[in-house]
Image (cartoon, helix red, strand yellow):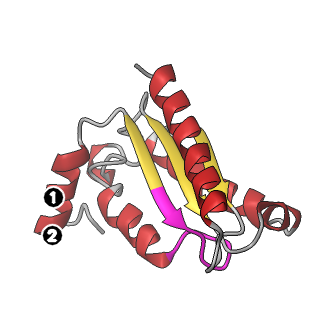
Amino acid sequence: MPDHPGFAPRSDVVEERREIADADVFVLVYPLWFNAAPAMLKGYIDRVFGMGFGYSPHSEGGNHPLLAGRKLVSFSCSGAPQHWVEASGAWSAMLNHFDSHLAAVVGLDVIGHHNLGGIVPGLRADVVRGHLDEVRRHAHAIVSAYR
């Protein structure tokens, strides 16, 4: 456990926490793997947003969110079309299990999760441009709302 005597986060975790310590909005960008966040992202969240950064150690009263008042937004992409991701139940499961749970544990407010479905090899250039325009619109709206 991160609050046991002698525990210290690895230097890369300490550096990452220092880099993002003053962020008002945390933005996660990742592909969906089997309709969920990839294990690498889960590991990053476990290590960086864990005890001592995202929530208080047991020795200090335990599990009190430390990032209250800050925001979380995610951008993801999937090979499956968005309507299928939603119809299969994967979308709501991921939003609850990943976004909402992370936000609740560390005190973040979820301000959106935008997924681009149907991202497969061989997309036409106009489709790629359309997806990039959609991401730009969402990003611009987020930045405008939180200036």
Q: Tell me the kind of residue under disc 1.
A: Val
Range of magenta residues = 29-38
**Do the numbered discs 1 and 2 sit on residues whose CB atoms are within 8 Å?**
yes
User: Can residue 138 be seen by looking at this rendering?
Assistant: yes
Q: Residue at x 74, y 60 (%)?
A: 91
Q: Which mark is residue 14?
A: 1
Location of residue 100 with respect to 38 vertically, above or below:
above
In the rendered image, the quadrant that contains the C terminus is top left
Q: Secondary structure at mark 2?
A: loop
Left or right of 18, for residue 64:
right
User: Residue 36 in magenta?
Assistant: yes
Please tell me whether the stretch drawn in magenta is mainly helix, strand or loop.
loop
Q: Which mark is residue 10?
A: 2
Q: Residues within 10 Å of mark 2 (few under 14, many from 20)?
A: few
Location of residue 18 with respect to 23 vertically, above or below:
below
Q: Quadrant of residue 92?
A: bottom right
Location of residue 55 with respect to 116 vertically, above or below:
above
- Coordinates of residue 66 in the picture (x, y in percent): 35, 39
In the rendered image, the quadrant that contains the N terminus is bottom left
- Coordinates of residue 39 in the picture (x, y in percent): 48, 77
State the CA–CA distance, disc 1 to disc 2.
6 Å
Q: Tell me the kind of residue under disc 2.
A: Arg
